[in-house]
């Protein structure tokens, strides 16, 4: 797809370098008045290359959407508009001279494809130049929520979810193809489809006319390493530091599938004991839940991630949730001391600032186990802290942490550790 110069690389580099030097001095001469002056006549295009110096020796007949390119020619300051196919590009007069024009290939999908650039002057004269806008394959970055009931909207974030109509975009969960009628919407960075039947699970894949995203590492409805769903399939044994009957709910207007944990109440940042006394604590002790030895999950901890679904219904701005793994048989003692490192979830703490947080529905939270590196008060743990994964505590903390008084409502479900 690239036009390779017949000139050898040394000669081409010398030519481009010389042209850039001439352009530099010409531009300086043109711009000394501080004004951009529109020229008459028509532009002449000599060649097009990438803007970055590392690829300056590659002359282009095509480029991907969003690529930064440099157009070399004559009388380029006569250009007032540029269209790639039928999509108008953004021009900056500070980046246009007689001989150079810096521009980014538009990121919008053309409705008419001609494989031409149209250079339009102030007098509406048009000069055409052969150039193909290459459209990348779709890219999946993440799912908003990885565990949803049948028929719920699955929101996928990424890039290049581009198609002229729904039949031109294919979505797969594992080997199951989502029916075209269940594709709710697609924009360049967001794709929405209806969740398939409950027995369907697997990695996502998106295909368009322009390529294939490949399968995601994240798995829709991933139940590997499931610790508790608060249902009969993955229960949590009752006792001190465990959710009470009031906190385990299954309101069909709020539930994902079955039961979920609900934490709510006033957070008083002046109360050093945090929310312990209000039941904001969850202990999952391996020996009481059928896992008397070993890890709570089968995957390698160093390359695994703690995941759960959460729905923050009411503003949260204090008392971060602390997650702590430790050995079986330790009971709650490790909540109170710094024997094992932990991780915090505090989405309201943004770049050192407190920004009250709600989640706009259920989301999937991911915390790599490699980030379990802090002490109870938020300071860095010693590098020689021991590691054990036979029990898990999740607790709202106040002491030693920033935050504001608030009255959040936080729903949590499907606590798991996945590879």
Image (cartoon, rainbow, N blue to C red):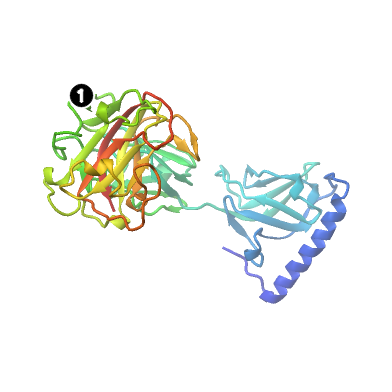
Residue 399 on image: x %, y %: 36, 35
Report whether residue 201 is seen: no
- Which quadrant holds the N terminus? bottom right
- Please state which of residues 168 and 255 is positioned toward the viewer in this rendering: 255
- Please state which of residues 214 and 228 is positioned toward the viewer in this rendering: 228
Quarter of the image holding residue 198? top left
Query: Residue drawn at (44%, 54%), measured in percent from left and top?
Result: 211
Residue indicated by mark 1: 246
Query: Residue drawn at (21%, 40%), measured in percent from left and top?
Result: 332
Q: Secondary structure at mark 1?
A: loop
Figure check: 337 above or below 129: above
Query: Residue drawn at (37%, 41%), measured in percent from left and top?
Result: 377
- Please state which of residues 249 and 76 is positioned toward the viewer in this rendering: 249
Residue 19 on image: x %, y %: 78, 65
Quarter of the image holding residue 288? top left
- Please state which of residues 93 and 292 is positioned toward the viewer in this rendering: 292
Residue 184 on image: x %, y %: 39, 34
Q: Left or right of 299: which side holds 64?
A: right
């Amino acid at each position: 797809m690239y036009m390779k110069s017949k000139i050898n690389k040394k000669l081409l580099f010398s030519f481009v370098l010389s042209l850039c030097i001439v352009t530099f001095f010409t531009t300086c001469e043109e711009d000394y008045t501080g004004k951009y002056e529109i020229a008459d006549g028509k532009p002449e295009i000599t060649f097009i290359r990438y803007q970055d110096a590392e690829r300056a020796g590659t002359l282009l007949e095509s480029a991907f959407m969003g690529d930064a390119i440099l157009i070399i020619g004559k009388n380029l300051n006569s250009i007032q508009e540029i269209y790639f196919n039928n999509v108008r590009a953004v021009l900056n007069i500070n980046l246009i001279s007689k001989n150079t024009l810096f521009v980014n290939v538009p990121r919008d999908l053309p409705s008419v494809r001609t494989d031409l650039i149209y250079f339009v002057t102030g007098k509406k004269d048009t000069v055409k130049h052969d150039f193909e806008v290459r459209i990348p394959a779709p890219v999946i970055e993440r799912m908003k929520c990885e565990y949803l009931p049948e028929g719920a909207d699955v929101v996928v974030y990424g890039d290049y979810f581009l198609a002229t109509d729904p039949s031109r975009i294919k979505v797969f969960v594992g080997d199951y193809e989502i029916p075209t009628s269940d594709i709710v919407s697609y924009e360049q960075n967001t794709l929405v489809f209806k969740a398939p039947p409950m027995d369907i699970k697997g990695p996502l894949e998106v295909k368009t006319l322009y390529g294939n995203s490949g399968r995601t590492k994240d798995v829709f409805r991933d139940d590997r390493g499931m610790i508790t769903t608060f249902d009969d399939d993955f229960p949590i044994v009752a006792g001190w530091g465990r959710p009470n009957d009031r906190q385990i709910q299954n309101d069909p207007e709020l539930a994902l599938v079955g039961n979920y944990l609900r934490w709510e109440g006033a957070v008083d940042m002046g109360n050093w004991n945090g929310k312990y006394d209000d039941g904001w604590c969850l202990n999952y002790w391996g020996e009481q839940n059928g896992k008397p030895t070993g890890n709570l999950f089968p995957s390698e901890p160093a390359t695994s991630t703690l995941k759960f679904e959460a729905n923050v219904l009411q503003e949260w701005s204090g008392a971060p949730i602390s997650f702590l793994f430790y050995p079986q048989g330790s009971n709650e003692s490790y909540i109170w001391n710094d024997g094992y490192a932990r991780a915090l979830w505090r989405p309201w703490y943004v770049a050192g600032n407190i920004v009250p947080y709600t989640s706009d529905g259920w989301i999937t939270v991911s915390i790599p186990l490699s980030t379990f590196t802090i002490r109870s008060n938020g300071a860095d743990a010693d590098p020689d802290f021991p590691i054990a994964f036979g029990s898990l505590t999740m607790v709202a903390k106040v002491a030693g942490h920033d935050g504001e008084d608030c009255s959040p409502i936080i729903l949590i479900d499907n606590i798991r550790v996945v590879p």
